[in-house]
Amino acid sequence: MSAFRAFGIVSSADNSIHVEGLHDYRPIGAFSFLGRFRVIDFPISNMSNSGMDRIQVYLRTRPRSIAEHIGSGRHYNINSKRGKIQMLFSEDTSAHNIYNNDIAAYMQNIDLIERMHQEYVIIAPSYMVYKQDYRQLLDTHIQSGAEVTLLYHKVDNARDYYQNCRIVTVNRQKGITSLDRNLGTAKEKNIFMDTYCMSKEVFVNLVKTAHELSSVYSFADIVGYKCKDMDIRGYQHKGYFASLLSLSDYYRASLDLLDYEMASGLFSNSWPIYTRTTDSCPTQYFESAKVENSFISNGCQIEGTVQDSIVGRGVTIKKGVVIKNSIIMAHCVIEEGVHIENAVVDKWAHIIHAKDIKGTVEQPQYIKRRDTL
């Protein structure tokens, strides 16, 4: 039960990252995922399932939707007597985004971090989706004697995807020799999953060192800088992994999970993904409805055709509508005769007059929240 020796930190996305459209209204952690979940449910569920019951969630810009979703944190199966999810709001202390990074957030809350009684910390991002037992990561870290252990995922499509991610170079002893931006120069790369394991003491020292070295250093920057003189190891992740740092990343990662084999790498009965549940009536399928290979949430009314798509809660899809390879978020109304393909339609959109909305797999069309077309 070594995970009880660690507390969790869920970090927020770097200010240099912007997901077209969706990000204008909420942080990446609050993005709807597969109609039912929010992206932040995955790191918190990983921590909860790993036996971690003290979790700090860092919130920066537009925090309302995440704060509302997490609430008391009870739905994450955290021990109600000694467990606690703390939402830590960091102030943007500068008008310049370059200064408002994770190090600035940690420094604002350094007293709270130092007060945590656990010996170790595991830091995971609120903008990546994966399943990981952090007990295994922590046990490996302790046994290796390393100062820092980084979680990474080996991919063979780094030339086309993961453009905003960092990559790690791993030697034969699983040591990390460098941490750099992915420049798309090769297909096979080890994508760093922005997930760290280390002692609380090492973490606090790195945060303070970064703060002293450069006002614009992020935590990844200081770890990359220290690769040459610290014992930093890698731990390889297996299974489903998605980094949601662009609209096309989000679109592709969501629709990939319509594949049963892919989805079974993320969801299992023994590793539940917890979320805030909403009581609503079942979806009503009318005689004219035709639904194939799709995730459909509760409370919808479907009269049209839905293929290879994800439909959020309370969506109305009228007669003659055809939706293909698209994500329709909660409470949208799609009126008769509309054709939508390769699109992401944000919450409460009402599509009436625009009869043909089409994007591409590489560049999905985005329809704004509360928009009427």
Image (cartoon, rainbow, N blue to C red):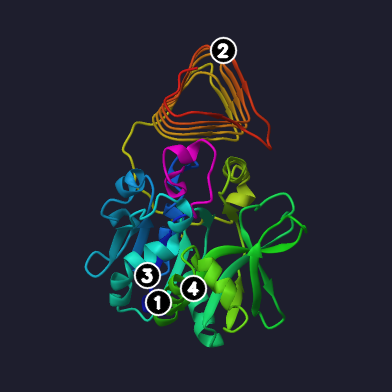
Question: Between disc 2 and disc 3, whose residue precedes?
Answer: 3
Q: What residue type is labelled 4?
A: Leu
- Residue marked by disc 3: 52
Q: What element carries label 4?
A: helix
Question: Between disc 3 and disc 1, whose residue precedes?
Answer: 3
Question: Between disc 1 and disc 2, whose residue precedes?
Answer: 1
- Residue marked by disc 1: 204
Q: Which amino acid does label 2 sit on?
A: Gly
Choose between 311 and 145: the one closer to the eye.
145
- Residue marked by disc 2: 337
Q: Which mark is residue 213?
A: 4
Above/below status of 334 relative to 113: above
Choose between 105 and 4: the one closer to the eye.
105
In magenta, the rendered stretch is: 14-31
Q: Which amino acid does label 3 sit on?
A: Met
Residue 222 appears anywhere in the view: yes
Residue 144: x %, y % from top left: 56, 86
Residue mark closest to the camera, 3 vs 4 = 4
Q: What element carries label 1?
A: helix
Question: Between disc 3 and disc 4, whose residue precedes?
Answer: 3
* Circle 4 Cα neighbour tier, 10 Å, few/some/many (<14 / 14–19 / ≥20): few
